[in-house]
Image (spheres, rainbow, N blue to C red):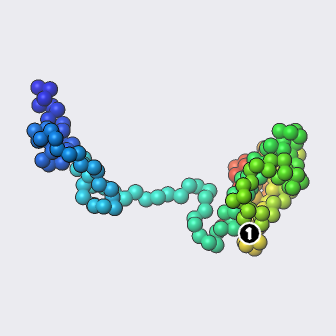
Amino acid sequence: MHALLTSLLLSAFLPLGAGADSDASATVRSPTTFRESSAPDVFGLPKIRMPRFRMPGRFKKNPADAPLALIDRRLRQFVGQQESWFVGHQRYSVDVPNVTRSRPGTLSPADSALENVQVQVIYAHARGWTAVASHPGAPGKSCVVFVGFRETLPFIPRTRADAAEAVDEGRPVCDK
């Protein structure tokens, strides 16, 4: 009974002619990839091309969006740098060069393109901070970020072109 069940299961999953009663020294076929053939795989199911989705909050690879992607990346790094500053000083800082020097290891030599991003801290205190950043390659566009409780901050900045307001703490919002 056990051998009958095994042969039925194997015949259901293996391609024709490769059942349990075939020669034991038969070579194992490797499954075909989608690009090689559109034939069904070993389980008899057709291969379906799956769409690729973008991660939310990330930019498409468009040359016009490159400066905004740099601004977004620089603000995300600046959030970490401000947190390091806070650990040592028990408050956030308005002085961007001091904050950047406090954690120099966060910028690698590959990040030389981020040097053109101008970050301006609008408000900083022990309870939180707000900032806006821009890039010369994207005139009239900006990104904004805040850290802290929205209720304790004097105001939440808005982007220049779309007047979009940062919604989540520590997550930059950029113009489209």
Could you tell me residue 175's position as x and y percent? 69, 65
State the quadrant of the N terminus: top left
Task: Report which quarter residue 11 is drawn in.
Answer: top left
Q: Residue at x 73, y 72 (%)?
A: 137
Amino acid on which the number 1 mark rests in the picture: Lys
- Residue lying at 61% horizontally and 58% vertically, measured from the top left: 58
Q: Position of residue 109 (x, y in %)?
A: 72, 58
> Looking at the rendering, in which quadrant would you find the C terminus?
bottom right
Q: What is the quadrant of residue 38 in the picture?
A: bottom left
Say what secondary structure mark 1 lies in. Answer: loop
Residue 122 horizontal/vertical position (percent): 86, 56
Q: Is residue 21 left or right of residue 49?
A: left
Question: Which of the pair 107/79 is nearer the observer?
Answer: 107
For residue 150, above or below residue 173: above
Q: Is residue 145 visible?
A: yes
Q: Nearer the viewer, residue 37 or 46?
A: 37
Q: Can you name the residue that lies furthest to the front here?
A: 25
Q: Residues within 10 Å of mark 1 (few under 14, many from 20)?
A: many
Q: Which residue is mark 1?
A: 141
Residue 134 relative to residue 88: left or right: left
**Residue at figure coordinates x 20%, y 46% from the top left:** 27
Residue found 81% across the figure and 60% down from its top:
119
**Residue 156: image location, x then y, percent:** 79, 54
Q: Nearer the viewer, residue 170 or 67?
A: 67
Q: 23 and 130: which one is in front?
A: 23
The answer to whether 28 appears left or right of 49 in the picture is left
**Does residue 47 lie above or below 7 as drawn?**
below
Q: Is residue 97 above or below residue 86?
A: below
Q: Is residue 174 visible?
A: no
